[in-house]
Image: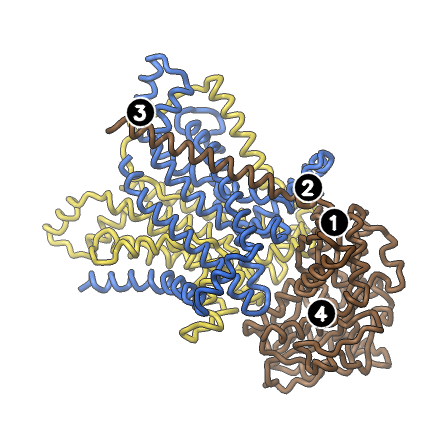
Chain colours: A blue, B yellow, C brown
Amino acid sequence: MIRWILRIIAVGYVLGLVALPVATVTRSTFAHGLQPVLDSLQNPDFIAAAKLSAIVAVLAVLINTVFGVGMAVLLVRYRFPGRRLLNALIDLPVAISPIVIGIALILVYGQNGWFGGWLESRGIQIIFATPAIVMATVIVALPLVVREVIPTLEEAGTDQDQAAQSLGANSVQRFWRITLPTIKWALAYGVVLSLARSLGEFGAVRVVSGSVPGVSQTLTLYVNDQYQEFGPVAEQAYMTAAFALMLSAVVFIIVIALLRPKENQQ
Amino acid sequence: MMKTVPPPPRRKPRSVASGRLTAASGLGLGVAVLWLSLIVLLPIAAIVVTSFQNGPASFWDSVTTPEALATLRLTVGGAALVTVLNAIFGTLIAWVLVRDQFPGKRIIEVIIDIPFALPTIVAGVVLISLYGPHSPFGVDLVGTREGVLLALLFVTLPFVVRSVQPVLIDMERDVEEAAASLGAGGFTTFRRIILPTITPAILAGAALSFARALGEFGSVILISANLPNTEVSSVYMLKLIESDDTAGATAVATLLLIVAIVVLVLLDSLQRVAARRD
Amino acid sequence: MNVLRQRRGRMATVLTVVAATALGLSACGSNGDSAAAASSKNLNLVGFAVIKSAYDELGTSFAKTDAGEGVTFKSSYGASGAQSRAVIAGQKADIVALSLSPDVKNIAEAGKIDTNWDSGPNKGIVSDSVVVIAFREGNPKQIKGWADIIKPGVGIVTADPGTSGSAKWNLLAAYSQALGPTKDEAAAKTYLGSFIKNVVSWNDSGRTATDTFVKGTGDVLISYENEAIAARAAGVKLDYVVPDSTFLIENPVAVTKTAPPAATAFVKYVESPDGQKILAGKGFRPVDPSVTATDVQGANDPANPFPKVATLTTVADLGGWSAVNDSLFDKEKGLVAELRK
């Protein structure tokens, strides 16, 4: 009896809160048939925004993966002063509003910022250009790979690594052949999480980008900008873009769901 | 320490790392420190320093304007309320997912993760579709605080669920079974045996939920419809920075950072206490 | 475990990552801002919130002329004040098309625009409009003019003067119509106070104000005549009235110091009869007196879209922008800030 009540509450909550709105967007997107959706997908601004988002996401994930694995190895395998501070710094982006992250980037890298003069004299533009979008995305997704990899590394211990070392393998060989395979599934899980998070970043990018269609307008900014235009064309445009992002999110989740048991086994 | 993803089930680590830094790893550490400084430390420092650029009195003025206080009340209050709701419902959902079997359970699992992977602005569009002027149910929450809370609940749903689930999966049932054989009812068993075990996980998920709700922007901006009654701090800070009130925006940001750190440290301590009792 | 398969799997992963990087970097290189912006045939336009539709068409038409052959536009639209500050802070711009002259003047003072940008016969203004009051289709609250909107229970939607140009024009209109012929400052202050009290939503730009109104908030929207026309032309269900006493909106355009020659040619095009005709078709009042519009979709009367206003106040009548910015819009001591406390 209790089991049924609990079941109904749990399922009802999840369906009502998440499934229902998602289904509604799907219905609204295709409310006028397939053709308007296809037309929206061929809009050059949409294509440019999708391309920019994809590039930014891939770059951000790459950067976060390289540094993430490195920092995970450092935190797990070594003791050094300031270890707890490093740990805390990695977690900090989660506690900060994306708007604040954007403001912070402007304060440091904007033309009137701490490094502004230095950057401008070398002709480097960060704010209102792609570098700022990439940096903002890197920051918001920073902890994801690290936090996935660390528990696996901790659990694996250093037996294998020490054995290899005693057999004469250098640190690069040990990293490629022992460490990486150990964290393979955790890393994959973290990468997919990061990819999803990076593709979906909005608030921080809103602050640092000029949102110029075709140049600095990501897909999330495209949704926001089209939402503010009038008329059925714009409405179809933002609905289609939102639907496309939603679809990619679901694909990511399914991949994550498939990877999760492997990660737990590792 | 706060974790972005739920802590793994506790098994003994096979060998504790005790490495001293070598030349290679020392260099790696240097690079990591430089990287984190450029990416996290300096920007945060810039926020705090800029917030006090006109002196502490100006900082105080910025965070105590009626509008600033109203947004803080809504933001902190909303985050707290949503976190409590998540603690309850998240645990319940995790329980049902682990201990119950029914057709379609895997689909529910996938649905729960949607808010985590969905871009926040898309979440905003999604919520407006269902609870906005064109709602198929005639429910219009645009411009209401209920709408804002709904948006916050949406984006924070996965945190407690995913935090508690692994712990429940890993729990050994023999203590429960022993209690049952001694005559303990379901609720007593839950209260005295299960709850203490999952409390650290609930607190960890609550911490993530609170931090996320405090800074949420994309999902709230559409449903709040720019009304003063539904203005959360992130929207207010954006308004300030666009109106060229950098000191004001950074002051509010610094205050929120302090609130976040205080609450997270509190939850972390509670988590340690609860874990020790286990 | 099949070691060979493992190794192939790992190889595949590495290759995918490398390929993705290569793809990303190459696409990045070919799409880079610098590549696009450096092309002398590309113009970067920074505009205020409500002009996208008009300037998109101006751009396409200009590209069909000899002077504009092969010219492409990369455009950004947003709240006038915020856009002005963005350009000063480094956003790339060849042409700025903003809501009010001070927003352009600030960019000139920051050194990015020649200080003689407004020395021409039109003082740099390329389009006009007037402040109108918009309400729900059918006028359920019987709004006829300024006096009706300060009645209790009427929710006003407008923009925020901190970021938006539209906001300033709206407040100027509300203030000046209450000043009346006798320049009664006390009456104007009282009216503005009642107006501000009825505001339910201060939005970051003229466009987001329209959005907020359209999506259900408030009873009246104060906005540009061209915005009300554009909304109606797009099928939005609202009506508007041009009050007997209202304010003249004047929108400036300027070319930055680093702009290619095509930018100046574009501004000339906008000022030409062809350009003015396009603007008129989108609901803007042309500054060229020889241009008349006879079929403006969305206007109350498409054949006579820009009715003469009985009492039309201008910024010059109030003493110019410096005086008005100080007395009304100063963030600490301005009248608006005082009344909003």
In this rendering, do the residues under marks 4 and 1 share a single chain?
yes
Q: CA distance from mark 2 to mark 3?
A: 46 Å
Q: Judging from the image, what secondary structure is the residue with disc 4 in? A: helix
Q: Quadrant of residue A123?
A: top right
Q: Judging from the image, what secondary structure is the residue with disc 3 in? A: loop
Which chain is indicated by disc 2?
A
Badges 3 and 4: C-beta atoms under 8 Å apart?
Answer: no
Report the amino acid beneath label 4. Answer: Leu
Badges 2 and 3: C-beta atoms under 8 Å apart?
Answer: no
Badge 4 is on which residue?
Answer: C339
- Mark 2, Cα crowd under 10 Å, few <14 / some 14-19 / many 20+, is some
Badge 3 is on which residue?
Answer: B15
- Relative to the observer, which residue lies in front, B102 or B11? B102
| Viewer-side label of 4, 1 | 1
Badge 1 is on which residue?
Answer: C88
> Does residue C5 appear left or right of residue C89 in this picture?
left
Q: CA distance from mark 1 to mark 2?
A: 13 Å
Q: Looking at the image, which residue is at 74% across and 46% down?
A: C40
Q: Judging from the image, what secondary structure is the residue with disc 2 in? A: loop
Q: Looking at the image, which residue is at 69% across and 65% down?
A: C54
